Structure formats: structure tokens, C-alpha cells
């Protein structure tokens, strides 16, 4: 025993284990050479390692923030929502090619702002205003185009109204970009029920189009800069576009071959009664969800809205459960939905619920007026509710640093 401890071990190995395991014992260790203990830094790294967050939690969090953005036109609250989502993305975005699409969504949001303001300037606005900024020459239109104006006076009230309206859509786009940057699409596909697997494949392929396209553009622009060629302007865009299109076609062909090799589209033989029950439950559940939602939104259907909605959701889930029996697929290491996923989802839902409540309690604070033109004020408790969306930055693990030796070369 003394000779064994002199080699750096605290106790002899268990039955069936050799002494090549490190000082932490057999569980959780990695193979080591005899007589060499596990370094403390490596043991600390194993202790800090936690499984990644469920991708569905990221999507629910981001869509909840987007829902909160649709409940207000206050530019201060919308800017706070953008700041919250950007901070979470900056601190929790993994180091992967598909996570680099957030900047593209931000640019798309800026383009939406500019286009909406341009339409307000060129086509006018129904918002009356007294603060005239500029008077453009008006183009006369025929009588059948009444209600449409080209040119004319541009008022500050019309521009501010267009800015508020466009900022709401831009915030929604940025929240969707945050979900694309935080949630792994391939892991999200594994989490879908079997009945939605084929639809989920199509959705995941569509969602990964933008990240792959942006990664190809960045890779080609970097390669052109290394070769001393232009990578900006119209000329650079035209010379980069053809390789990007070629790469997209090659990726689609490879994806089709991989799906065919893995038997995509195969279905299991199920009894006719099960198929009819699946169709009835799914269709009846969706109709129940629609009827229950309509009842909740109307004053007359408040009594039956919630029971019908719950019954529809239960029937739809039962139909999806039965429909999954037709799909021949297995899941390797499915992502667990743990306490952290519940906290992330609850934080986004809380933001959406509190801003919906604030919109009904104090609509003037969440929808500042433009006639007369007044400066928007920041409501305190809705702003504090938006800050709840920062909870994922505190409860989720930080992204693992990348190994420079594994970085792809251009």
C-alpha cells in the first residue's frame, strides 16, 4: 500500500480498474499514464463543464422578447430590449459558424428602419403634423390613385411615427437573430417530436441558410483579402456571389445525398385505426386551439375559451404522440430540459407577460403619442420587467473557448 501511494495515488484502484486513472478515481477521469496524477487545472475544467442549454429554451426566450416588442412603440423600451438581447448574445454565443448571423440580422433591422423612413418621406403619411421639415415637389397622380401621394411636405410627426413603427419590427428581427445565434439548429431538430421530424428538417434547413451563407461570404472575403483583391463594393460583391452560389448548390446536393443515405422519409407500418385516430386528434386539437384562442380574445367567449384551449392542446399533443410512431428514428444523447432551461424560458415569458399587462394598464406610457410631438418617457416598472431578460446571462454556462489548432484554415 505504501508503494502504491508513493506513486501519487490516495488509494488503490477498484476492482476491474487499472492504476492508469488519475488521482480523482475512475469516474469522470481520463486515461493517464501509470504514476501520473491528473493536473489540478484539468480537474477544475472537468468540474466546471456542464451540458449546453436546450436550444428550445433559447428560441422560447427570444420569441418572448419579440412578443414583448410587439406590445410597445416606446423607443426607450425597444432600445432596452435590443440591449438585453445583444448582451446575452455577446456573453453566451458559442464559437460556431452558425452563430455568426447575429450581425446580419442587425444590419437587416437597420435596413428596415431606413426603408420605412424612406417610404414615409416619399409616399407621405396619414399622420397630420404641423412641424414641416422639408417640402418636396409633389408628383401629380391620376384620379384612380387617390389616397396615394408622391412627394409633398414632410413633417416631423410623420417621421417620428414611422421611426417608432419601424423600430418595433427591427427589434423583432434582432430577437430572431439572437435565437439563431444562440440555439444550435441541429440539436433543435433532435428535440422535435417524431411526428414533426420531416417538417422540422425543412425548417432547420431554412434556418441554417442564413448562417451558412454569411459564413461563406466571410470566408471568401477573407481569402480575397489574403490574395490582395478587392472584397468590398459592387465589384467585390459580384465576384464573391458566384462562389457563394456554387457552395450553396454543393451543400444542397450533399445534404440530399446524406438524407437519402440515412433513409429520410421512411415510415413505419401502423394500423389504420391508429392513423385515423392520429388525424382526428391532430385536426380536432388544432380546431380546439383556434376556438379557445378566439374565445379568450373576445368578451363573450371568456367562459368557454380556456377549457376549449386546454382540451385542444391536449388533443393535439396526443395526436403528435401517436403520429410519432410512424417515424423510424432514434435519438442519441437527447438534450435534457433542466432547471436552467426552465429559468431561461420563464425569464422571457415574464418579460412578455409583464409588458402585455403594462400595455393594458398604461397604454400611454408604452405607446407615446406623436401628435402633439412629445419626448418619450421611460416607464420604470416596465423597464425593470425588461431587465428580467438578462437572467440567461447569469444562469447559463459560458461558451467553451475554441482550440486554435482546430480552427479551419482558409
Image (cartoon, grey):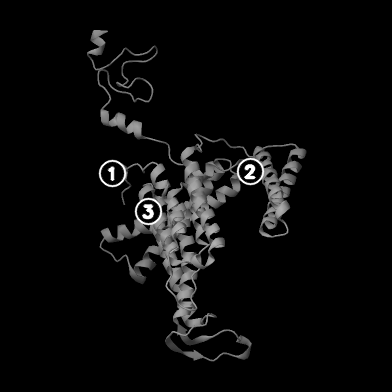
Residue at horizontal 25%, vertical 63%? 228
Front one among 340 and 281: 340
Label 2: element kind:
helix
Give the alpha-carbon distance from disc 1 to disc 2, as whole Å.
40 Å
Give the alpha-carbon distance from disc 3 to disc 2, as whole Å.
36 Å
Give the alpha-carbon distance from disc 1 to disc 3, as whole Å.
25 Å
Residue at horizontal 27%, vertical 31%? 41
The answer to whether residue 247 shows anywhere in this view is: no
Question: Looking at this rendering, what residue extends furthest in the left direction?
Answer: 6
Q: Earlier in the sequence, mark 1 or mark 3?
A: 3
- Residue at mark 1: 404
Return the x and y of residue 107 as percentages of the image width and height.
40, 64
Residue at horizontal 31%, vertical 19%? 20
Mark 1 crowdedness (10 Å alpha carbons): few <14, some 14-19, many ≥20: few
Mark 1 or 3, closer to the camera? 3
Label 3: element kind:
helix
The answer to whether residue 45 shows anywhere in this view is: yes
Q: Is residue 379 above or below residue 316?
A: below
Question: Looking at this rendering, what residue extends furthest in the top direction?
Answer: 1
Label 1: element kind:
helix
- Residue at mark 2: 195
- Residue at mark 3: 87
Number of numbered labels in the structure image: 3
Amino acid at each position: 500500500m505504501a508503494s502504491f501511494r508513493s506513486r501519487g495515488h490516495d488509494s488503490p484502484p477498484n476492482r476491474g480498474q487499472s492504476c492508469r486513472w488519475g488521482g480523482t478515481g475512475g469516474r469522470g477521469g481520463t486515461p493517464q499514464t501509470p504514476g501520473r496524477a491528473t493536473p489540478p487545472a484539468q480537474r477544475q475544467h472537468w468540474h466546471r463543464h456542464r451540458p449546453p442549454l436546450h436550444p428550445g429554451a433559447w428560441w422560447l426566450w427570444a420569441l418572448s422578447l419579440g412578443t414583448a416588442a410587439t406590445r410597445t412603440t416606446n423607443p426607450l423600451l425597444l432600445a432596452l430590449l435590443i440591449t438585453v438581447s445583444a448582451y446575452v448574445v455577446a456573453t453566451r454565443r458559442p464559437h460556431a459558424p452558425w452563430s455568426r448571423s447575429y450581425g446580419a440580422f442587425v444590419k437587416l433591422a437597420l435596413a428596415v428602419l431606413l426603408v420605412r423612413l424612406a417610404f414615409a418621406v416619399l409616399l407621405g403619411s396619414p399622420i397630420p403634423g404641423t412641424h414641416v421639415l422639408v417640402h418636396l415637389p409633389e408628383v401629380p397622380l391620376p384620379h384612380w390613385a387617390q389616397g396615394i401621394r408622391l412627394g409633398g411636405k414632410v413633417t416631423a410627426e410623420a417621421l417620428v411615427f414611422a421611426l417608432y413603427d419601424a423600430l418595433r419590427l427591427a427589434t423583432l428581427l434582432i430577437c430572431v437573430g439572437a435565437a439563431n445565434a444562440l440555439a444550435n439548429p441541429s440539436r433543435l431538430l433532435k428535440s422535435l417530436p417524431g411526428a414533426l421530424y420531416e417538417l422540422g428538417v425543412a425548417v432547420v434547413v431554412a434556418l441554417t441558410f442564413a448562417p451558412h451563407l454569411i459564413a461563406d461570404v466571410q470566408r471568401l472575403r477573407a481569402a480575397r483579402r489574403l490574395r490582395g483583391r478587392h472584397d468590398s463594393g459592387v465589384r467585390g460583391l459580384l465576384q464573391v456571389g458566384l462562389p457563394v452560389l456554387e457552395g450553396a448548390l454543393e451543400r444542397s446536393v450533399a445534404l440530399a445525398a446524406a438524407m437519402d443515405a440515412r433513409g429520410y422519409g421512411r415510415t413505419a407500418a401502423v394500423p389504420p385505426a391508429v392513423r385515423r385516430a392520429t388525424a382526428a386528434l391532430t385536426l380536432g386539437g388544432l380546431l380546439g386551439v383556434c376556438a379557445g384562442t378566439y374565445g379568450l380574445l373576445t368578451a363573450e367567449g371568456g367562459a368557454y375559451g380556456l377549457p376549449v384551449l386546454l382540451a385542444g392542446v391536449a388533443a393535439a399533443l396526443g395526436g403528435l404522440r401517436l403520429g410519432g410512431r410512424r417515424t423510424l428514428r432514434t435519438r442519441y444523447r437527447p438534450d435534457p430540459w433542466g432547471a436552467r432551461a426552465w429559468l431561461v424560458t420563464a425569464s422571457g415569458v415574464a418579460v412578455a407577460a409583464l409588458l402585455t399587462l403594462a400595455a393594458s394598464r398604461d397604454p400611454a406610457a408604452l405607446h407615446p403619442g406623436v401628435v402633439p410631438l412629445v419626448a418619450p418617457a421611460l416607464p420604470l416598472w416596465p423597464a425593470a420587467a425588461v431587465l428580467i431578460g438578462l437572467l440567461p446571462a447569469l444562469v447559463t454556462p459560458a461558451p467553451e473557448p475554441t482550440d486554435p489548432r482546430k480552427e479551419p484554415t482558409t
